[in-house]
Amino acid sequence: MGLLASIGRNFLTSAETLGGIVLVLLRILRALLPPRFDRDETWLNLYKVGVKSFPIVIMTALFTGAIMVIQSGQYVKQTGATGLLGWGAGYAVLAEIGPVLIGLMFSGRVGANNTAELGTMKVTEQIDALRALAIDPVHYLVVPRFVAMMLMLLLLTALGDLFALVGGALTSQFILEVDWRVFYQGVVNSNLLDEYLTGLVKAVCFGGSISVISCHYGLTVSGGATGVGRAVNGCVVTSAIGIFVFDYIVTFAVNFLKLG
């Protein structure tokens, strides 16, 4: 009975969290039709979540491309199929590994910070003060973060894919001793535009899910500083789950359309 009670509590907690996330999303969509949000706050968030995330995203992308090439290096050396090196690394990076890893790094840096920021405002009653001044927190705080995260994760993924291929080319040249032009030609000849666009669609979905989840946890904080810590932890875990769920959904949808 204790096990069943624990399962029931976890199920109800998960259902409550999912319902709260959906409600935050609906409030955001209502605020966007027609668009009503603070533009100065949006520009500030574009800088915080985009420009400040650029270095860590580029480092992640460079090593991601390098790892993909190293993983396939043994097969290339055994078979001499150097022309497949660019295709294998490019396909994995553009369609799957690049968007997912960049999304996870973005979640750990931006999503957690957003939850902590909103949670601190909640426990110090700053959000209540906004309501007292007839300022809707969704329009002023949540929507700018939603727009900024979706847009900047899209741009960061587009740049990250490029740097991942650069990392793969450098690794091919200096570690596997395969000329970088062979790697480049393999990427070009593979016609990976569909995979690149699929990765960008995933980035938009990841950015939207991270923003909604982080805002939900931030706005529902209770219990002071301890509650903020729990909210940040919950945000990181739930955002990671959301990334993998959307990765599956988009991949399934794309493959279904191709087969159809």
Image: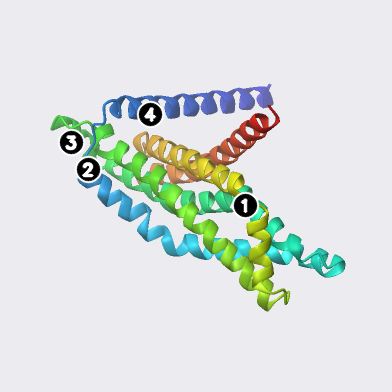
Camera-side residue of 249 and 134 = 249
CA gap between label 3 and label 1 equals 43 Å
Q: Find numbered disc 3 in the image and state the secondary structure of the residue it sits on.
A: helix
Crowd rating for badge 4 (residues with CA inside 10 Å; few <14, some 14–19, many 20+): some
Which badge, 2 or 1, comes first in the chain's sequence? Answer: 2
CA gap between label 1 and label 4 equals 29 Å
Q: Residue 50 location, x and y as percent?
A: 37, 54
- The picture quadrant where one finds residue 211 is top left
Which badge, 3 or 1, comes first in the chain's sequence? Answer: 1
In this figure, which residue is indicated by the disc labeled 4?
Answer: 24
Nearest-to-viewer mark from 1 and 4: 1
Residue type marked 1:
Ile
Q: Residue 151 location, x and y as percent?
A: 39, 45
Residue type marked 4:
Val
Q: Find numbered disc 2 in the image and state the secondary structure of the residue it sits on.
A: helix
CA gap between label 2 and label 1 equals 33 Å
In this figure, which residue is indicated by the disc labeled 1?
Answer: 97
Residue type marked 2:
Arg
Which badge, 4 or 2, comes first in the chain's sequence? Answer: 4
Quadrant of the drawing holding the N terminus: top right
In this figure, which residue is indicated by the disc labeled 2?
Answer: 39
Q: Find numbered disc 4 in the image and state the secondary structure of the residue it sits on.
A: helix
Which badge, 4 or 3, comes first in the chain's sequence? Answer: 4
CA gap between label 2 and label 3 equals 20 Å
Q: Residue 27 location, x and y as percent?
A: 34, 26
